[in-house]
Image (tube, rainbow, N blue to C red):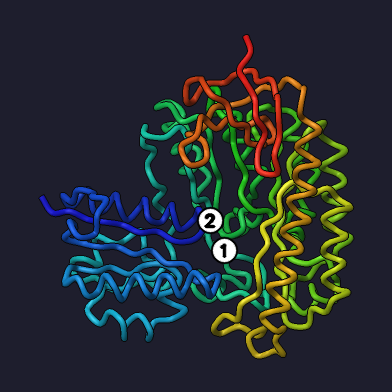
Amino acid sequence: MPTYYIETYGCWLNKADSALMEEDLRRMGYVKVNDPAQADLILVNTCAVREDSEIRELKAIEKYSRLGKKLIVAGCLTKARPSEIMRLAPDALIVNPSSVENLAELLKGGVNLTERLMVRIPKYYESSHVYVVPIQVGCLGNCSYCVIKYTRGGMGWVKSADLSVVKESIAKAVARGAREIYLTGQEISAYGKDKGYDLVDLLEAVLRDVEGRYLIRLGMLEPLELEGMIHRLIDVIKNDWRIYRFFHIPVQSGSDKVLRLMKRKYTVDLFKREVELIRRSFRNSFIATDIIVGHPGEDDSDFQESVRLIRELGIDKVHVARYSPRPFTEAAYMRQVPDQVKKQRSSMLSKVALEVAYSRNLEYVGGTYEGLISSIGFKGRGLMARLMDYRPVIINEGDLGSFVKIKVTGASSINLIGKIIE
């Protein structure tokens, strides 16, 4: 039987895309191997968000193209750096992000689509108790630094999976043992804008019609879109324990000046009000956010506003990214912040974020909480459980997929430490 090897970079949506392409390969008789040297076909699913990742991906593409095997390059880099990919791997099959649902047709000589269909959702496999469900692509923004609006679609364009298809996929997965349902997409707060319904409608339908013990984990919620649904969303979460009290709201900067340069179309005050409302609404909640440091136009005072924001709101997790110029974006043509300054700011903010996270986690030590054992722990150490706010807890024993009561005995900046109690 023919064999394939796959390498995936980037976000959870990209991982879901890889799952779809793997389904096509398996239907065609391919068997997965973990060593590219043993594969008849190599698939590299790329990401274009960061320059450092792009460099690694291009090196991998060049390396695999020299093996003389059938090579497929998929993902956002195929739209962001098409000429570079063709230079490094002229014989590779290119699968753009709009065509990941149609790999089988492309392998038979078909052509790439210009728009994503969103008619297929990856199947659930019992090897994991976590089921990743891509519910939409596209976004409503037009950020000055972002290339993904060109590679996947954006600037007001949204394509959503039908509510009934999402609900049916989740129902089948739960019936087969899925315990954590991760709703992902480019901007899930924009879900349904092309259909006449929204994310809250989807959640209400799933919770009403899909019986069982499972927890839904929400993907990224843009501040501007969240504003219009936050009260309804909080009500749904309050009224059903099956949604993690977890909110990933990317603020990107604590400076209104920088947000304007980014073309983010909201203010820091809106983000603050959303976080404060969530904190008031739930006894325990987990707030994650993203901060880009060194965006063109960011000076020291702007950066310090980001630092103060993280401290003031007690953000549980901050994804800190150094700005890097991306092709086809406005920000790439603005006056750039020196690399050394970006490096210093990234290091400083990361340190502050870890201090704040540790302080937040300490509040849980000594308490007893409900949780779900969802996966193996970091680097294979112990088991990973998630509290009802998605806060990670490392425990030494238990069964994957089981709901347990946990006594928290310790904390770090990254996770809690606990033990199961009867």
| Quarter of image, res 6 | bottom left
Decide if residue 53 is in sight here. Answer: yes
Tell me the CA gap for discs 2 and 1. Answer: 7 Å
Q: Residue at x 70, y 89 (%)?
A: 334
Q: Is residue 46 left or right of residue 285?
A: left
Q: Helix, strand or loop at disc 1?
A: strand
Name the disc covering residue 158, or none: 1
Q: Is residue 110 left or right of residue 161?
A: left
Residue placed most toward the observer, 187 or 80 = 80
Residue placed most toward the observer, 349 or 229 = 349
Residue 50 placed where, x, y %? 55, 71
Residue 169 placed where, x, y %? 44, 38
Specify the farthest residue to the left: 1
- Name the amino acid type tagged 1: Val
| Quarter of image, res 222 | bottom right
Going from N to C along the chain, the mark reached first, 2 or 1, is: 2
Name the disc covering residue 192, or none: none
Position above or below: 280 against 147 = above
Residue placed most toward the observer, 208 or 61 = 61
Position above or below: 374 against 308 = above
Asked whether the beta carbons under mark 2 and mark 1 sit within 8 Å of each other, the answer is yes
Q: Is residue 107 left or right of residue 239?
A: left
Q: Helix, strand or loop at disc 2?
A: strand
For mark 1, does the 10 Å Cα neighbourhood hold few (<14), some (14 to 19), or many (20 or more) residues? Answer: many
- Name the amino acid type tagged 2: Gln
Q: Which residue is mark 2?
A: 136
Residue 323 placed where, x, y %? 65, 74
Q: Residue at x 57, y 80 (%)?
A: 326
Position above or below: 246 against 297 = above
Residue 26 placed where, x, y %? 22, 48
